[in-house]
């Protein structure tokens, strides 16, 4: 592959003027058997480059490790991009934002109560150095200087919105070089943050979604010479629980793209294909109120969550054709879909009756945070005994993020962080009653100073003003459900329960799981964790990639935290329900 050059006049590739026309495609949000399909569709839309982040928290779930298997095989993804003739912009962070859990920073960093993330804190730098020294050297063959597709690598991510510590950016740039990255480096920031987030001698780029001339003018004022590039041209947006499904009118988005390309600037569409934050990997925002992001990362992108071209795809293809060659091949058609159901989930396994199969509790005076338990995602179950009967007021210093309270297994209340709630009142039936508190990590904050987002019951728990002590803390990451003891459901169980059923298929293809009548929880198919369901919306279906399914019997497991009201059944439909676009 030719090597990208940065000159005063712009980009050059193979000693010819070059314009980057790229689109975001996160390999970790797409089933690996779909990578080649999505890359092909990127080329067919007229893109010459794709961009991807790299999630530290998945690649290094514990210190000293590096996972590159299955859906984390970045090397295989880069090989497929090269085979499609696409260049790659690599954004390894270590912080990535991306509406991803913790902005991609691993939760084990937060087990140290005093650590300062995204800083010169020696504890943070040691962890970053170790991670990059494991991640990057094996990727050298994918750099354009070694014949690979990666033409440029980003330093950090929108750092100017967080801090102005140039020394930290300089450390990361030196680290990239030390780890063998010898292609051009770049930073990206919103126009108002360029001075805080850029680094002398490294290309600065801007992020915006409209008013291209204004954004590029700010970039040119900051950087008088060199290429102009928008690294995140926002053509859609993400959704949060309790909000609406955000869309951007295709013709208006195409008009904005046309205006940007007319300036001669380079661009990376954010996103070309959003994909899905499977499992527990969605992030959250906290600008005075905690707001968790939904699992679908459809982003109203040119390719929808299932990889089908949208109206925006076709309009963007027409716009790009005005400025760059577009393949003469026809635009891709929508893919096949599977529909089935309703599928009754006729077996159940109550959570509280199956705790021995799910983990071992830790006994301490105060509840332990998820990070102190060495846990990244999922739930924590806290238990203690209540000393006396009668009406009580239970107060907690902080709930991160949603707590369900049970006395002797019966539900007595819920506290939600986003509602700024800290107290629940209930009646205790007898001295020595068992208090159980099930706390859900709904996604660590991925943007701003709220990154230091520890999960669980934080601090003290007071009963009628007196601290409750003597707790057990049971981590429930729910990574292995194989030991659950399912029995036929005769009557609806009380409390959080796993429900299981079997779906028989003659042919398999992508589909969407709909859960009419269910309240809140999680969904697994053949052991693959699709993500969270919540009747609150806006998202009311979960994308199920075809490669997860198999011909014949398919196991579906739904964790219901509250109650299901329509016969404990789910449906597979050909279309999603991402919610209303107006509140």
Image (cartoon, helix red, strand yellow):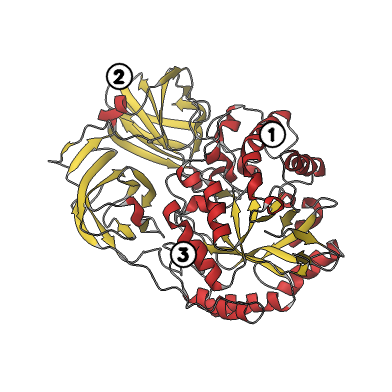
Measured from the top left, where is residue 85 in percent x and y?
A: 59, 63
The crowd level at tag 3 (other Cα within 10 Å; few <14, some 14-19, many 20+) is many
The residue under label 2 is 431
- Badge 2 element: loop
Q: Is residue 404 left or right of residue 206?
A: left
- On screen, 502 above or below 125? below
Q: Quadrant of residue 560?
A: top left
The residue under label 3 is 245
Q: Quadrant of residue 2?
A: bottom right
Q: Nearer the viewer, mark 1 or mark 3?
A: 1
Q: Nearer the viewer, mark 1 or mark 2?
A: 1
Mark toward the start of the polypeptide (1 vs 2) = 1
Per the model, the C-alpha gap separating discs 1 and 3 is: 39 Å
**Which residue corresponds to the image point at 42% horizontal and 31% vertical from the top-left?**
394
- Badge 1 element: helix
- On screen, 505 above or below 125? below
**Which residue corresponds to the image point at 51% horizontal and 29% vertical from the top-left?**
369
**Which residue corresponds to the image point at 79% horizontal and 52% vertical from the top-left?**
198
The crowd level at tag 1 (other Cα within 10 Å; few <14, some 14-19, many 20+) is some
Q: Is residue 269 left or right of residue 13?
A: left
Measured from the top left, where is residue 390 in percent x and y?
A: 32, 26
The residue under label 1 is 129
């Amino acid at each position: 592959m030719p090597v990208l050059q940065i000159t005063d006049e712009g980009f050059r590739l193979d000693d010819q003027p070059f314009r980057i026309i790229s689109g975001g495609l996160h390999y970790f949000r797409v089933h690996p058997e779909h990578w080649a399909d999505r890359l092909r569709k990127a080329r067919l839309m007229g893109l010459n480059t794709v961009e991807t982040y790299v999630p530290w928290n998945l690649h290094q779930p514990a210190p000293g490790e590096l996972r590159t298997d299955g859906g984390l095989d970045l090397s295989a993804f880069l090989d497929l991009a090269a085979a499609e003739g696409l260049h790659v912009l690599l954004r390894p962070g270590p912080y990535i934002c991306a509406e991803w859990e913790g902005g991609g920073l691993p939760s084990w960093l937060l087990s140290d109560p005093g650590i300062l993330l995204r800083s010169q804190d020696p504890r943070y730098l040691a962890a970053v150095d170790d991670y990059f020294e494991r991640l990057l050297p094996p990727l050298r063959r994918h750099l354009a200087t070694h014949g690979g597709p990666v033409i440029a690598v980003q330093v950090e991510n929108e750092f100017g919105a967080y801090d102005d510590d140039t020394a930290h950016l300089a450390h990361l740039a030196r680290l990239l070089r030390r780890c063998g990255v010898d292609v051009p480096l770049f930073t990206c920031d919103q126009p108002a943050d360029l001075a805080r987030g850029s680094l002398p001698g490294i290309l600065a780029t801007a992020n915006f979604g409209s008013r291209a001339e204004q954004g590029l003018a700010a970039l040119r004022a900051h950087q008088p010479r060199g290429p102009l590039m928008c690294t995140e041209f926002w053509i859609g947006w993400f959704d949060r629980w309790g909000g609406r499904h955000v869309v951007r009118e295709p013709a208006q988005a195409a008009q904005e793209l046309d205006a940007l390309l007319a300036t001669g600037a380079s661009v990376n569409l954010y996103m070309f294909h959003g994909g899905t934050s499977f499992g527990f990997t969605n992030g959250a925002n906290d600008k005075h109120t905690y707001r968790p992001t939904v699992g679908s990362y459809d982003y109203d992108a040119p390719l929808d969550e299932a990889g089908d071209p949208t109206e925006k795809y076709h309009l963007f293809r027409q716009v790009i054709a005005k400025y760059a060659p577009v393949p003469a091949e026809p635009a891709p058609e929508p893919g096949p879909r599977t529909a089935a159901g309703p599928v009754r989930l006729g077996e159940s396994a109550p959570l509280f009756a199956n705790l021995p199969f799910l983990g071992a509790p830790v006994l301490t005076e105060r509840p332990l945070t998820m990070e102190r338990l060495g846990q990244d995602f999922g739930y924590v179950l806290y238990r203690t005994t209540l000393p006396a009967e009668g009406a009580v007021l239970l107060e907690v210093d902080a709930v991160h993020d949603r707590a369900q309270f049970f006395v002797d297994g019966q539900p007595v209340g819920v506290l939600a962080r986003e509602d700024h709630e800290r107290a629940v009142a209930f009646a205790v039936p007898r001295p020595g009653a068992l208090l159980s508190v099930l706390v859900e990590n709904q996604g660590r904050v991925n943007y701003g100073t709220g990154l230091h987002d520890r999960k669980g019951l934080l601090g003290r728990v007071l009963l009628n003003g007196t601290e409750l002590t003597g707790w057990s803390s049971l981590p429930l990451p729910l990574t292995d459900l194989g030991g659950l003891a399912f029995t036929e459901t005769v009557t609806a169980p009380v409390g959080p329960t796993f429900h299981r059923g079997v779906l028989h298929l003659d042919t398999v293809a992508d589909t969407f799981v709909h859960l009419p009548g269910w309240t809140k929880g999680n969904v697994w198919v053949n052991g693959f964790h699709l993500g969270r369901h919540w009747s609150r919306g806006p998202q009311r279906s979960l994308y199920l990639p075809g490669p997860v399914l198999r011909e014949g019997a398919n196991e579906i497991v739904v964790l219901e935290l509250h109650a299901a009201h329509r016969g404990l059944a789910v449906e597979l439909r050909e279309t999603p329900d991402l919610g209303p676009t107006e509140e």
